[in-house]
Image: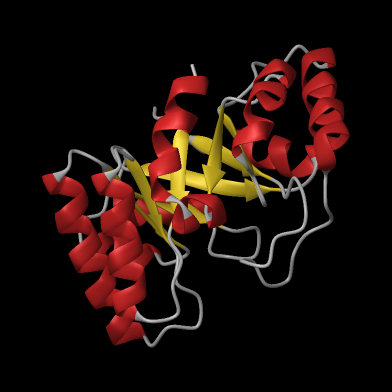
Amino acid sequence: MEKLQYISQGFTIEDQELNIRKALDNGIKWIQVRWKNAAENELIKLCEISRKICSDNQAVCMINDHIHIAKMVDADGVHLGLKDEEIVTARQILGENKIIGGTANTLEDILQRIDENCDYIGLGPLRFTSTKEKLSPILGFEGYEKIIKELQSKSLEIPKIFAIGGIILEDIERLQQIGIYGVAVSGQITNQPSIINQFKSIIQ
């Protein structure tokens, strides 16, 4: 599984598509299409376009929140927030071979996601981010350390955890030292797509 995810940004379909194309052109191999408050027909159109261009670039195409759209466009999977539809529902609709990710903010959330058999967990936010409405409590590096240590103390296999929420290049080494598997980045890659190569050179 790729260790660097790009979460798409943009207020219009044109902005979204452009940002996704730039990320792909700069070597990203995992896109999560996230476009909150979009009209459904526009979102479906964006997801169809994204699925095709990801496929052309041998990149994974995930859809944020919308299981039925992920099914409709035959995306590689779906990422579900804590208040979205259940993981078991996504698995029933999408089948065993699709990737299903789930958001977490606490140790309890992670244990729930492990029980639900998520393929990976997006844990955050690391710090304040303006790209997400209704932000969960901020974890900081100490929050990640505490959760990983608690998982280890329970002798649980650490799942594939991606840090999310205001992640920048300088955070990577410390997050990996803590035991985080990968990162999901939005703002910094949107603003500077060429930085993807630097991310990839650090994430091992």
Q: Estimate the x, y position of residue 4 in percent, counting from the top left.
A: 46, 35
134 to the left or right of 192? right
Can residue 116 be seen in the rendering of this structure?
no
Q: Residue at x 73, y 44 (%)?
A: 109
Give the left or right position of residue 170, taking residue 102 as reference.
Answer: right
Q: Residue 168 placed where, x, y %?
A: 62, 42
Which residue is nearer to you in this view: 83 or 115?
Answer: 83
Q: Position of residue 161 (x, y in %)?
A: 60, 32
Quadrant for the N terminus, please: top left
Q: In this rendering, is residue 105 above or below 132?
A: above
| Quadrant assignment, res 163 | top right
Classify 11 as above or below 159: below
Work out which residue is located at the far left of the displayed protein and give it: 56
Q: Give 16 or 124, whichever is nearer the viewer.
A: 16
Query: Viewed as shown, does residue 148 lie left or right of 182?
Result: right
Q: How is the image coloured?
A: secondary structure
